[in-house]
Image (spheres, grey):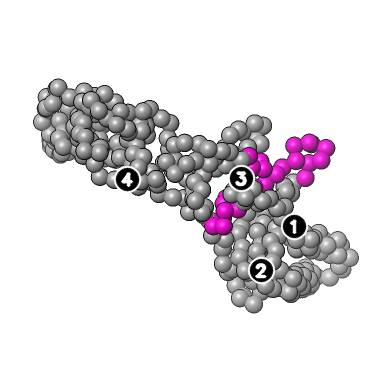
Amino acid sequence: MHLYFRLIVLIGLIVTINSCGRKAIEEDKHPDLPYFPETTATKIKFETINFNPHGFYKIEDAFFRITEVSDIHYLQKFSVFYYKDDLTTQIGTMPLVDDYRFIDENGFSYCYHFETDISKYDVSPAVTKTHVITGEKKNIDYVKADYGSVYENIFKANEDYEKQLTHLADSVIREIRFKRIDSVKKEINTKFTHSVLKGLQKVRKINLNSRDNSFLLQYKNKEVVLKNAPFWHSDDAASKCPLDLLETYAKYNDLEPIVVERIAGLDVFDHAVRGNHLGPGKINFFLQQSGIQYYELNYKNEKTFFKLNSKSLYNHNLIQLLLMPDNKTMLLYSDDRQFKLAL
């Protein structure tokens, strides 16, 4: 009896949940309107283009984006592509050195160059920066002192040294070991503070390989790469490791991409429910609607109408009207189709 009762309650719950948000199915409310990209326009022209509004930058009056152009045998190639202020007309290009990493607020793109000749292979790539407007290129030198190796070597040195101490108790050997390690830490921190931190203005952590803690270091009149900053755990502020000390400094500022403006002029003026379905996600018991969206586009005092099938009926971001930085060029943009408007 209890099992039967539970089954009835479960069925009722399922029916109730599946009715949440359900809406009546409707016929096409505007059967005379064409489906996009067809429209009712007689004067507005739609030129199909390939356009992505994300990733454009501006320095001075130049608009550009940095794009990967090939990825052969794990060697990535990047180029700078320059555009007019309509962001659709390409006017030039400049190849970069291999593996592009970031662009700073002053317009310098930072790249790594990995040696492809296996006989000359070095795990430390050349780090370069190139100004995207002037083309000025600089190689960035490495800090000569290898603080990471100094710290790592103490452990091997301890092993060799402790072979001579087998006549001592283990507790005494451990005490000697930790004192030697602490001594090396203090020596590293003293040298690091005077030779690296003095005059340091900005830092940026970079990954020369998957395991190191390397940094770009910027001073008033120079820029260098520090390879593999030492790291150790410490609860004592006075004995912070070099990596923690570097993390307290100001960071490089990336150049922020421009935001292509979305403008008014494209409106959904009606909907027609054509289906009900469960919302996205693994656990979502509420129904959403699919169906037809009906659009009105206003462009330079001309109007046109069209409709669009949508799996998310009340999402009005499927198509957007964008205004380029020239304040003249307008695009109809969706993830899979883009059009430049003209009369």
Q: Nearer the viewer, residue 136 or 252?
A: 136
Residue 343 x, y percent position in the rendering: 29, 31
Residue 135 x, y percent position in the rendering: 64, 48
Disc 1 on helix, strand or loop? strand
Report which quarter residue 213 is drawn in.
bottom right
- Residue at 63% x, 39% y: name it: 95
- Crowding at mark 1 (Cα within 10 Å: few <14, some 14-19, many 20+): some
Q: What separation in Å lies between label 1 and label 4 (alpha carbons)?
A: 45 Å
Q: Residue 142 carries which label?
A: 1
Circle 3: residue type: Tyr
Give the residues in magenta: 95-122
Q: What separation in Å lies between label 2 and label 4 (alpha carbons)?
A: 41 Å
Circle 4: residue type: Arg
Circle 2: residue type: Lys
Disc 3 on helix, strand or loop? strand
Q: Which mark is residue 262?
A: 4
Q: Mark 3 points at which residue?
A: 100
Between circles 1 and 4, the one closer to the viewer is 4
Whichever of labels 1 and 4 marks the residue nearer the N terminus, that label is: 1
Circle 1: residue type: Tyr
Q: Are marks 3 and 2 in contact (CB under 8 Å)?
A: no
